[in-house]
Image (cartoon, helix red, strand yellow):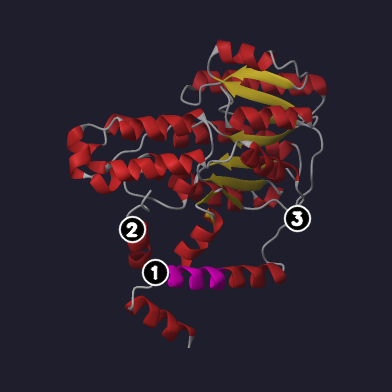
């Protein structure tokens, strides 16, 4: 009966009603599995130890999480690329916040950073209990105009760099005993691809796959792997995305008005103004590090009052052609 009702609604193109119905059904299914106890796994919790946070260069997700975790008593190694950023970290005057120079695209800096971390933790008689992979760059444009070098650079930082750091961290996390944590700072773009969202979105989908593999591979040692999937978050990188799209040349805008047109860009700017601060990502990262039942995925943020977690549930249940149609709807009139 439910399927018949949904079919009738689809035939009359009542998209909003369909979305609401599917969303309610998805929530019901999720609650059912949670009620069966299948949605959680317990891990030991380390209340002390070292945590490496990459991508802590400036005010943003990595830096704010690093500062907050350090204030909670963890020894946090804030990974930055430039000496000026290391000085800025030191200027926070937090004894447990330690800057380390690490460029995830340069193996020599990764090896040097881990050598320092191992020696420092040995001196403090503490284990490495957490890794927050947050180093990333973004380039997003219609595929027709995508520069291959830009795509390679996005993967070099967002995927290969993440692997290189994680490989060095795994033996140390294993040595700490059960309950060590890996937290991948990904994006809603790793769940939902939109027109004009690549190559960035492709790198985030790759991180999703990598994280699932890691979760299975590291399960014998009780190492938790969580993914943070925020939507719009008020950071400098968000401002950079807006600038990239606004600066697209006239030829691109003419060919792709449904992606780069004025109405679309204005709607993006409106949604960006609604973006929450990094407080929401820091809260999720801390839960992934400190909770006895960390989530596999933290989908954060909302657009026009609709949470991205609800959008994900709808996407998982709707036929792809139907969801494509929803994504292709024109932006609301201002």
Residue 61: x %, y % from top left: 59, 33
Residue 110 figure quarter: top right
Task: Kindly state the secondary structure of the residue where label 2 is placed.
Answer: loop
Is residue 231 in the magenta section?
A: no
Is residue 157 something that shows in the picture?
A: no
Q: Dot 2, how many residues are within 10 Å of its Cα: few (below 14), some (14-19), or many (20+)?
A: few
Is residue 311 something that shows in the picture?
A: yes
Q: Residue at x 79, y 40 (%)?
A: 46
Question: Of discs 3 and 1, which sits in the foreground?
Answer: 1
Residue 171: x %, y % from top left: 66, 35
Q: Nearer the viewer, residue 164 or 226?
A: 226
Work out whether mark 1 precedes mark 2 in sequence or the reverse, and give the earlier one: 1
**Image disc number at residue 329:** 2
Magenta-drawn stretch, dominant element (helix, strand or loop):
helix
Residue 310: x %, y % from top left: 54, 60
The reply to whether discs 1 and 2 touch (Cβ–Cβ < 8 Å) is yes
Task: Kindly state the secondary structure of the residue where label 1 is placed.
Answer: helix
Q: Nearer the viewer, residue 133 or 119?
A: 133
Q: Which residue range is magenta in the image?
A: 15-26
Q: Residue at x 68, y 41 (%)?
A: 283
- How far apart in space, not on screen, are marks 3 and 1 (Cα)? 39 Å
Q: Dot 3, how many residues are within 10 Å of its Cα: few (below 14), some (14-19), or many (20+)?
A: few
**Image disc number at residue 42:** 3
Q: Is residue 320 above or below residue 62?
A: below
Residue at the spot of label 1:
15
Q: Dot 1, how many residues are within 10 Å of its Cα: few (below 14), some (14-19), or many (20+)?
A: some
Question: Of discs 3 and 2, which sits in the foreground?
Answer: 2
The reply to whether discs 3 and 1 touch (Cβ–Cβ < 8 Å) is no
- How far apart in space, not on screen, are marks 3 and 2 (Cα)? 42 Å
Q: Is residue 308 above or below residue 240?
A: below
């Amino acid at each position: 009966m439910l399927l018949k009702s949904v079919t009738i609604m689809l035939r009359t193109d009542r998209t909003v009603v369909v979305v609401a119905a599917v969303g309610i059904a998805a929530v019901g299914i999720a609650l059912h599995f949670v009620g069966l106890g299948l949605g959680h796994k317990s891990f030991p919790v380390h209340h002390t130890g070292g945590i490496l946070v990459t991508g802590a260069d400036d005010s943003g997700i990595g830096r704010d999480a690093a500062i907050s975790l350090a204030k909670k008593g963890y020894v946090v190694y804030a990974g930055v690329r430039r000496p000026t950023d290391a000085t800025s970290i030191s200027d926070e005057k937090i004894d447990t916040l330690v800057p380390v120079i690490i460029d995830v695209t340069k193996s020599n800096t990764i090896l040097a950073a881990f050598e320092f971390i191992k020696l420092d933790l040995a001196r403090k008689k503490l284990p490495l209990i957490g890794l927050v992979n947050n180093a990333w760059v973004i380039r997003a444009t219609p595929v027709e105009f995508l520069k291959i070098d830009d795509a390679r650079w996005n993967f070099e930082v967002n995927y290969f760099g993440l692997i290189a750091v994680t490989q060095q961290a795994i033996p140390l996390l294993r040595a700490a005993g059960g309950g060590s944590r890996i937290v991948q700072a990904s994006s809603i773009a790793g769940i939902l691809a939109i027109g004009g969202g690549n190559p960035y979105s492709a790198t985030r989908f790759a991180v999703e796959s990598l994280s699932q593999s890691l979760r299975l591979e590291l399960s014998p040692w009780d190492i938790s792997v969580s993914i943070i999937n925020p939507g719009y978050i008020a950071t400098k990188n968000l401002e950079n995305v807006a600038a990239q799209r606004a600066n697209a040349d006239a030829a691109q805008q003419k060919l792709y008005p449904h992606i780069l047109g004025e109405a679309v860009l204005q709607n993006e700017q409106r949604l960006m103004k609604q973006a929450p601060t990094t407080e929401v990502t820091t809260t999720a990262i801390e839960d992934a590090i400190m909770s006895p039942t960390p989530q596999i995925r933290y989908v954060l943020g909302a657009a026009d009052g609709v949470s991205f977690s609800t959008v994900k549930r709808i996407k998982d249940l709707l036929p792809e052609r139907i969801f494509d149609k929803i994504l292709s709807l024109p932006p609301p009139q201002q």
